[in-house]
Image (cartoon, helix red, strand yellow):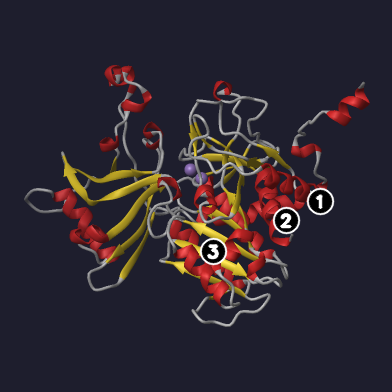
Amino acid sequence: MDELRSKLFYEQKNGYDLIDTAERIDAEKYCKAYMQFLNDSRTEREAVDNAIRLAEKHGFVSYVPGMELKAGDKVYVNNRGKALMLAVIGKKPLNEGAVIAGAHVDSPRLDLKQNPLYENEELAYFKTHYYGGIKKYQWVTIPLELHGVVALKNGETVKVVLGREPDEPKFVITDLLPHLAQDQMKKTMAEGITGEGLNVLIGSAPYADEGKDRVKLAVMSMLNDMYGIVEEDFLSAELVAVPAFDVCEIGLDRSLIGGYGHDDRVCAFAELQAILDVKHPERTCVCLLCDKEEIGSEGVSGMQSEAFDTFMEDLCESQGVALRRCFEKSFCLSADVTAAFDPLYPEVCEKRNASRVNYGMGVCKFTGARGKSGTNDASAELVAYLRRLYAEKGVIWHMAELGKVDQGGGGTIAKFMAKRNIDTIDAGVPVLSMHAPFEVVAKLDCYMTYKGVLAAFED
Ligand code: MN
Ligand code: MN
């Protein structure tokens, strides 16, 4: 009976029962590099800058329209500093399709409003407008840092990073003390902290003179000294408040990584490292670091933008290939995180189909909500292809469903790739506390996602 059982039944094993010591060492090495990347990449712009730096070290050059391209050439296009497209030209022509991996580098955060600075009762604040799906109560009473750019009228752009260095000041959103929170505590978690209540405390010492708004004046005067900006410059700024936690190992066994922005820089780094490592691919490999996924892939730097089509058309034109011929033969791994089963909240998942920490890359045949609304829903044939490929290449993976039926749902860039007539499937790292200021992933899953992307590139 046991023999028959093992022959007929499917059993998913914990990844630690499947990998050997040599591979665990490789995983550690990989995760160390990832932790550094995540620590240094707090916004989509910083992720793109850091990715370009790594890519250039590996021989990638900025693509110039009309450039002659041959097998093995490595090019990238920087889409307005917020999204990045990289390609390694394959031996086969593009009418045989490309292998595309797409992940996003934007994460939930608090954007400063365009008129952010005000003083109230001799304290100075920045008003914010949250970006992406957040549980607002998680963003109060944690250290925050400021990142972004201020575009000046004269055409210059000033970069801002404030609070990242250990000796730099941080910022915070305050909350009520429990002693006086009787009324607040009766509210639902959705209502207890409001969007307009997410105001970042940035200073308290007044400017040494008479008059009103003395704290605001002191703050503005310091910002002027540091960055040469005046209040009007906020109108054309993109400044964001993000958690000021350092990325760190979690657990006595150091098997997990805690940090801000794993969604989706953990998959972005996996595909970036994979395209840096791929050698002489058969088909052209494309790595996409996209922006705006957290708000529906809109905008000129999101996956709905034709910046991607333009890049691919340029590559195709250099070989005299029609873009649509390339797309219909291409394969896209939409690399995005998935919700890991959390034993503290078992009620929202259906255990037989939920994604699990340490079970490797989570493959989502479908995402969406209710009756699978809004999903790409990869074909059975595409899943079979991955099963075959990952069995061959020793990639540990499992099937992952985003929560119980009718519990909620979500989406990724997958449907926007599928719309272009590209066979697409979602796959990525399972995350605990997704979209929180401090998310948790497992090292084993990070490494397997890298292996999973590399396997597709090398196939
Ligand atoms: Mn995501
Ligand atoms: Mn997300």
* Left or right of residue 135: residue 77: right
Query: What is the C-alpha distance between the residues marked 3 and 1?
Result: 29 Å
- Work out whether residue 7 or residue 451 is closer to the camera in this orientation and state it: 7
Q: Residues within 10 Å of mark 2 (few under 14, many from 20)?
A: some
Pointers 1 and 2 in contact (C-beta within 8 Å)? yes
- Work out whether residue 365 or residue 49 is closer to the camera in this orientation and state it: 365
Pointers 3 and 1 in contact (C-beta within 8 Å)? no
The N terminus, quarter of image: top right
Kind of element beneath mark 3: helix
- Mark positioned earlier in the residue sequence (3 or 1): 3
Residue 335, given in percent of the width and then of the height, sits at 59, 50
Q: Can residue 135 be seen?
A: yes
The C terminus, quarter of image: bottom right
* Left or right of residue 62: residue 285: right
Q: Residues within 10 Å of mark 1 (few under 14, many from 20)?
A: few
Toward which corner of the image does residue 37 lie, by quadrant? Answer: bottom right
In the picture of the structure, the residue carrying the numbered disc 1 is 392
Residue 368, given in percent of the width and then of the height, sits at 51, 37
Residue 153, given in percent of the width and then of the height, sits at 22, 69
Query: What is the C-alpha distance between the residues marked 3 and 2?
Result: 21 Å
- Callout 1, which amino acid? Glu
In the picture of the structure, the residue carrying the numbered disc 2 is 455
- Mark positioned earlier in the residue sequence (3 or 2): 3
- Mark positioned earlier in the residue sequence (1 or 2): 1
* Left or right of residue 346: residue 117: left
Is the shortest distance between ligand 1 and the CB of mark 3 under 8 Å?
no
- Callout 2, which amino acid? Ala
- Callout 3, which amino acid? Ala
Pointers 3 and 2 in contact (C-beta within 8 Å)? no
In the picture of the structure, the residue carrying the numbered disc 3 is 51
Q: Residues within 10 Å of mark 3 (few under 14, many from 20)?
A: many
Question: Which numbered tag is attached to residue 131?
Answer: none
